[in-house]
Image: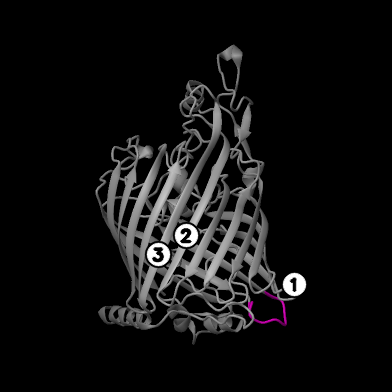
Amino acid sequence: MKQAKARFLLWIFAIGLSQLVHAQQSRSDFPPAAQTTPPMPFTEWPYGGTPTLGASLPNAVDSPLMNALDKTAVGQYMSQHHIQAYGWVDIGANASSSQVAGGNAPAAYDYNPNSLSLNQAVLYVERVPDTVQQNHNDWGFRISAIYGSDYRYTSSYGLFSNQLLSQNLSNGWDLPMMYFDWYTPFVAQGLNIRIGRYISVPDIEAQLAPNNYMYSHSMAYTFDNYTNEGILASLALDRNFIVQAGITVGTDTTFNHRNQTVTNPYPNNASLGQYNPLYPDDSFRVDPGANLAGTFCVRYSSDMNETNINLCANGINNGDYGYNNLQWYGVTFYQKFNEHWHLAAELYNEHQNNVPNALNAAVQNIYANNGAPFSSRFMPFNAPNLAQCVNAEVLTCTASATALVAYLNYSPDKFNNFSLRPEIFWDPQGQRTGVATTYYNLAIGWQHFFSEQIEFRPEIAYYHSTVPAFNGNANAGIAPNKNDQIVIAADIVYHF
């Protein structure tokens, strides 16, 4: 047994010495790749909802797992059909000035202070369409699975979400991406149509660990759109412009919630002394924000890809308060100064309409009697926050948030990058973070690759809020009591 175990460990170690290579070969009439990976988390300036138009190739990931499968019948079948499997394990730890469980929030992703976490173990199975060639239609798909503490950020209401919303598990699993791609080079300079669940289109950052500069995430990313379910078309008009348009059902919620209803335990009934002007009927929708929504983006890249601007409107509908029915309008901007320095920046505003007022006595009574979709009877943990409206007399108001974040990056060589992340996050009604305040944050991170497979990301972050917002836990009924927070953290990402 000991010899067998030793052989197994040696096999794992041998896989660990293998490289994880992402092939990159842009079309000659498209801008060249903006960056290299490593040390960057991407080669093209990020945009979601599509494979990279003009640069995606089948079998582009030379992973240790595929190398291990290479001589097997399964591996040969996968290679012949351009199907790949790969993933990573991300383990992180932090030391924080906060102490309460969950008290690092609203900072993310190191949710629990002074802890060691399996943040995410991820497996991809995918086929990437060839968007470089120009002579045939192609297709692709991705199924991704994640397990770990980061599931709380990827969860979509209605898809295995009881782990978070009913049980508040420390670790859970999710399928953050399940989609099908169809690509044709015969419309303009290339058209891809994606159907399924996919990462939201805008943003510098993404849920999956290797797609980010740093271990922690900005608050800007933590509190905006994560995933969509629907259909999205991405069209390269020419070498400089890409447009995207699609239809989804809200954000981070499932299709079936659009028409699903439940019995209202506390309908409006004067004879019983029940006053519920918010949800007066005998039933209400499970998620009132799960409505058809539109997305439209325009992306510009300069001829040599030094400059990139992406303007987006994501998840746009009537904006009714829902699990996460965010009306997102924003812009991302990238500027490459030279081979060592570049800047990534993002500015957005998001809002929801008709958000119940947490300061209104009638609203408090309705929620105490479970007469609302996100009251404790239906969602005992991690329910979306109410708004702290300016006027306590109104039943609802519009809740908005504005974010500005930047990453200034310096890469001295292929295996190292240093990031400076300043940020302002303004949450005047407290609907996104639970506290009506403005946050000022500054973080410094180092991304170091021991090899093309093993990445180490230490960092230090300072957070300040104008009123106490840290070292609390709404699920445990513990109010925050700190205006300032310092978190020293690091993670290791091991690709397989």
Question: Residue 480: x, y in percent?
Answer: 32, 38
Nearest the eye: 389 or 308: 308
Reading the image, the residue beneath label 3 is 408
Q: Amino acid at mark 2?
A: Ala
Q: Residues within 10 Å of mark 1 (few under 14, many from 20)?
A: few
- Please report the residue visible at 60 percent of the width from the left and 56 percent of the height from the top: 312
* Quarter the C terminus occupies: bottom left
Q: CA distance from mark 1 to mark 3?
A: 37 Å
Q: Are marks 3 and 2 in contact (CB under 8 Å)?
A: no
Reading the image, the residue beneath label 1 is 187
Q: Is residue 295 visible?
A: yes
Which mark, by number, is residue 345?
Answer: 2
Spot the residue most to the bottom. 71
Q: Amino acid at mark 3?
A: Leu
Residue 427 falls left or right of residue 277: left
* Quarter the N terminus occupies: bottom left
Which mark, by number, is residue 88?
Answer: none
- Please report the residue visible at 70 percent of the width from the left and 81 percent of the height from the top: 134
Q: Which residues are magenta?
A: 130-138
Q: Residues within 10 Å of mark 3 (few under 14, many from 20)?
A: some
